[in-house]
Image (cartoon, rainbow, N blue to C red):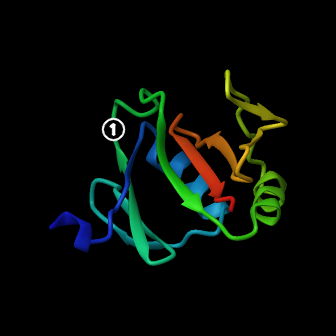
């Protein structure tokens, strides 16, 4: 049933103005802003929400991610926009300069938004 519908991530923000500036610097344009400041953006064929919350940044796992077709170009553009990628060492999964490359050729990188939400960029291997 739910598999028939697009999923829309919701990302908490302790400072909604700061969060909006971050996402809009990455090229997202608000589609709707509610009176409480919740802001809705479109990313590809789905949307996501950034909403005010005192719990922003408390999740220590990936909150949302983008599957891309030109990983290196996207990473280069994000770095040019001031994004700093996280480094992880989880045994089999280890990043080098913020990028993990898996045996099947999958590339992945993670970064935090201004609110501490962990976001990922992925390109599947073969």
Q: Quadrant of the C terminus?
A: bottom right
- Foreground residue among 33 and 125: 125
Pick the residue in front: 105 or 58: 105
Helix, strand or loop for disc 1? loop
Q: Quadrant of the N terminus?
A: bottom left
Give the residue drawn at x 25%, y 66%: 3
Q: Position of residue 122 (x, y in %)?
A: 63, 55
101 left or right, relative to 5: right
Q: Tell me which corner region of the image, top left, top right, bottom left or bottom right, holds residue 28.
A: bottom right
x then y, percent, for residue 91: 67, 21
Q: Tell me what residue is drawn at x 32 percent, y 70 percent.
A: 6
Disc 1 designates what residue? 53
Q: Residue at x 27, y 60 (%)?
A: 35
For this rendering, which residue is in front, 115 or 64?
Answer: 64
Q: Is residue 91 left or right of residue 65?
A: right
Task: Identify which residue is drawn at 64% across, 59% down.
Answer: 124
Is 22 drawn above or below residue 58 in the view shown? below
**Residue found at the far left of this picture:** 1
Name the spot of residue 100 as percent of width and height, x first.
74, 40
Q: Quadrant of residue 41?
A: bottom left
């Amino acid at each position: 049933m739910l598999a028939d519908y697009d999923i829309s991530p919701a990302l908490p923000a302790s400072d909604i103005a700061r969060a909006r500036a971050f996402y809009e610097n990455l090229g997202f344009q608000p589609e709707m802003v509610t009176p409480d400041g919740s802001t809705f953006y479109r990313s590809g064929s789905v949307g996501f929400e950034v909403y005010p919350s005192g719990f922003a940044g408390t999740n220590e796992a990936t909150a949302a991610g983008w599957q891309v077709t030109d990983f290196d170009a996207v990473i280069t553009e994000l770095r040019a926009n001031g994004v700093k990628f996280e480094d992880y060492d989880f045994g089999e999964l280890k990043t080098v300069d913020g990028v993990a490359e898996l045996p099947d050729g999958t590339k992945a990188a993670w970064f935090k938004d201004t609110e501490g939400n962990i976001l990922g960029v992925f390109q599947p291997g073969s």
